[in-house]
Image (cartoon, helix red, strand yellow):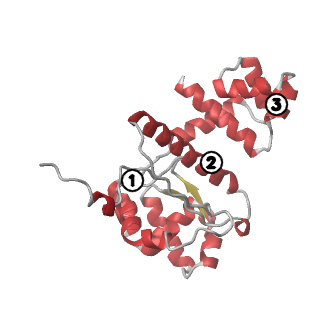
């Protein structure tokens, strides 16, 4: 069941990449758009309809299966030692982030103070770390999955906490497409779990949009960072006022 659900997710991405809407799929199948939405939400297809949707997406079932197989062999996280090596070298870290954002070799050397020779050396190190595959003509193929993330409390997250945290919040968050909201409340365990589940979906959607936009010219994309967090926390000034237990 998990395999078929993942296959449907691949199909959804193919439709989105090609700009094919549910309405268009509905016309192809001669059914209502609501029926198509229900099929995708329930992941319930007959083989005949699945084949028809593949034709609408100009792809084949075998191609979907091949894409899924490639994704399943990709890694979703690095090891602690791999992250440690990357974050220890500022330029290596930069090139790794550029690779994650599908910035090409030529775009890297044009935008940053990194020579062509040095960039090749850095990409070769990332290749050795199994983060990328360095191909002929300095082309880069990512070896990490669409849902890749840094290790929780790993070297790179610790780097953010120690050095980048203050930089990130040194903003009014009032520029276009920026937003920050702090909400306080008291939740039950079940409500907290529901919020966590929704935040994970938002993070996944961010990753999907990032992957959709890699086809756009670099000039049309901006570096954006999404911070998603919820934790047990009380302002220390309030905690200091709590009655101490006898």
Judging from the image, what secondary structure is the residue with disc 3 in? helix
Q: How many marks?
A: 3
Other-residue count near label 1 (Cα within 10 Å), few / some / many at <14 / 14–19 / ≥20: some
Q: Is residue 66 left or right of residue 144?
A: right
Picture quarter containing residue 60? Answer: top right
Does 119 sit above or below residue 216? below
| Residue beneath disc 2 | 208
Using the rendered image of the protein, determine whether residue 146 is visible from the camera's viewpoint: no
The residue that mark 3 highlights is: 25
Q: Do the residues labelled 3 and 2 touch (CB within 8 Å)?
A: no
Image: 68 above or below 94: above
Tell me, yes or no, if residue 125 can be seen here. yes
Residue 178 shows which numbered tag? none
- Classify 119 as above or below 81: below
Sequence order check, earlier mark of 3 and 2: 3
**Distance in Å between CA atoms under marks 3 and 2:** 21 Å
**What residue is pinned by disc 1?**
151
Work out how far the residue at label 3 is from the one at label 1, CA to CA, in angstroms.
39 Å
In screen coordinates, is 7 left or right of 55? Answer: left
């Amino acid at each position: 069941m998990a395999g078929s659900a993942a296959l449907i997710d691949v199909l959804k991405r193919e439709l989105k990449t090609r700009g094919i809407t549910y309405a268009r799929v509905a016309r192809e199948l001669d059914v209502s758009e609501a029926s198509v939405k229900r099929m995708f939400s329930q992941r319930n297809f007959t083989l005949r309809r699945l084949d028809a949707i593949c034709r609408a997406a100009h792809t084949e079932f075998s191609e979907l299966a091949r894409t899924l197989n490639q994704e399943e062999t990709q890694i979703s996280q690095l090891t602690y030692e791999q992250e440690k090596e990357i974050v220890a070298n500022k330029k290596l870290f930069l090139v790794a982030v550029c690779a994650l954002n599908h910035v090409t070799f030529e775009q890297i050397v044009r935008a940053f103070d990194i020579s062509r020779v040095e960039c090749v050396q850095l990409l070769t190190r990332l290749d050795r770390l199994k983060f990328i595959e360095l191909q002929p003509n300095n082309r880069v193929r990512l070896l990490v999955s669409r849902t890749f993330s840094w290790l929780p409390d790993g070297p790179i997250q610790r780097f953010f906490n120690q050095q980048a945290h203050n930089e990130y919040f040194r903003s009014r968050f009032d520029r276009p497409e920026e937003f920050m909201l702090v909400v306080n409340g008291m939740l039950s365990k079940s409500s907290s779990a529901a919020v966590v589940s929704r935040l994970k979906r938002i993070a996944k959607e961010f990753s999907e949009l990032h992957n959709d936009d890699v086809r756009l010219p670099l000039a049309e994309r901006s570096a954006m960072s999404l911070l998603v967090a919820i934790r047990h926390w009380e302002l220390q000034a309030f905690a200091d006022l709590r009655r101490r237990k006898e």
